[in-house]
Amino acid sequence: MKKVITYGTFDLLHVGHINILKRAKELGDYLVVAVSSDEFNALKNKEAYYSFEDRKTILEAVQYVDEVIPEHNWEQKIDDVRKHNIDLFVMGHDWEGKFDFLKEHCEVIYLPRTDGISTTKIKDDLNNKVNNG
């Protein structure tokens, strides 16, 4: 069985998230999704709309996702790869090269992101609608 892992905040789930989850799952048999904990988001100065528990519940309902684990810090990736017997690490291409250090533990692939959609864009669009009536 080929096991795949990806990481993210996965707040305000959108088609871009679904696309990367689907493509990641197509590259293996079992998909583990590591979701940033609320505490980790605070360390990154990133505020999610939904709590970790809510984001975890939402992801567990996505047909491509087999398991959801918490991401507590940047350094845990090697331990996650080992603990979960991961064969393939997948991230969006905007992280290209940032996780190449994992190549000695598993295969690393950067997938293209979906053009025109991001959680940041959704939040900005909503703020603009509220502020501009």
Image (cartoon, rainbow, N blue to C red):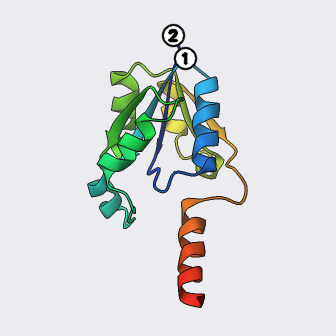
Amino acid on which disc 2 is placed? Met
Is label 1 in contact with label 2 (beta carbons under 8 Å)? Answer: yes
* Residue 70 x/y as whole percent: 32, 41
Residue at screen point 58% across, 49% down:
95
Q: Residue at x 69, y 50 (%)?
A: 114
In the rendered image, residue 59, in percent from the top left (x then y), is placed at: 44, 40
Dividing the picture into quadrants, the one containing residue 32 is: top left
The residue that mark 1 highlights is 29
- Residue 35 found in image quarter: top left
* Residue under label 2: 1
User: If the image is split into quadrants, where does the C terminus sit?
Assistant: bottom right
On screen, residue 73 versus residue 9, left or right, reads left
Residue 66 percent coordinates (x, y): 44, 25
Instruction: Please tell me whether residue 42 is drawn above or below residue 88 in the rendered image.
Output: below
- Residue at the left extreme, as displayed: 39
* Residue at the limit of the structure toward the front, as seen here: 133
